[in-house]
Each structure stands twice: as C-alpha cells, then as structure tokens.
C-alpha cells in the first residue's frame, strides 16, 4: 500500500466509529472471527483497544493484521484501523 492509498483510507476511517473492542482477554477466536467477517463485508475496520488490555496497541494491530491477512492503516491512541481487499462483488471497493 502506498502513501496516497493509506492517506485515502485514513480519511475514510476518520469518519467511522470503532465497531469492535479488544479488552483484557486480548485477541480471542471470537474477536478474530468477528473482525474477519467485518473486513470481508466492509474492507476497512476500525477497532478500539480498551485501556485494560494487556498488550500494546501496535502489538495488537500487528497480530491482527498477520492473523487476518490485512494491512494496518494506522494506530492512533487506542484505535486501530485495518484494511483488507474483499473479493466480494457486493462490497463497495475503497481502493
């Protein structure tokens, strides 16, 4: 992903609210399944890492990206934005 694509995705993500939260239990199978479904349906997902989470936000972002085949668009404060291209024809493609 180049810088102009990343900037476009960041601007789209600014208007969105986080739709998933990661807390004390960290990245569970349920969280992975939920984020995977969201990426398939939307391509761009914003996630909130709660303050009681054991791991650092950047660490959580990298673990999620690796597990789901996604790219980290940004980490800002306690928010993570992930992107993964969806092959579905029903999805509005962002890039």
Image: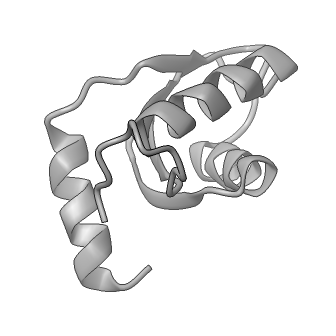
Query: Who's the residue at 73% across and 47% down the image?
Result: 68
**69 is higher (above) or lower (below) than 20:** below
Report the coloring of the rendering: one colour
Q: Nearer the viewer, residue 72 or 86?
A: 86
Query: Who's the residue at 22% across and 69% down the image?
Result: 7
Quadrant where the C terminus sits is: bottom left
Residue lying farthest front?
89
Query: Who's the residue at 85% across and 21% down the image?
Result: 29
**59 is higher (above) or lower (below) than 2:** above
Asked which quadrant contains residue 92, the reply is: top left
Residue 91 in the figure: left or right of residue 61: left
Position in image of residue 19 (x %, y %): 42, 19
Number of numbered discs present? 0
Can you see residue 90? yes
Position in image of residue 67 (x %, y %): 80, 48
Residue 86 in the figure: left or right of residue 46: right
Quadrant where the N terminus sits is: bottom left
**6 is higher (above) or lower (below) than 64:** below
Residue lying farthest bottom?
2
Q: Nearer the viewer, residue 35 or 86?
A: 86
Q: Nearer the viewer, residue 73 or 57?
A: 73
Position in image of residue 53 (x %, y %): 68, 23
Q: Nearer the viewer, residue 78 or 16?
A: 16
Can you see residue 50? no
């Amino acid at each position: 992903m180049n810088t102009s694509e990343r900037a476009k995705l960041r601007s789209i993500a600014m208007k969105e609210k986080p739709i998933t939260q990661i807390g004390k239990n960290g990245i569970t199978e349920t969280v992975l399944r939920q984020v995977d479904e969201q990426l398939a349906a939307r391509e761009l997902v914003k996630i909130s890492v709660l303050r009681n989470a054991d791991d650092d936000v950047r660490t959580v972002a990298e673990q999620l990206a690796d597990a789901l085949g996604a790219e980290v668009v940004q980490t800002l404060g306690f928010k993570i934005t992930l992107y993964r291209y969806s092959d579905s024809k029903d999805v509005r493609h962002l890039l």
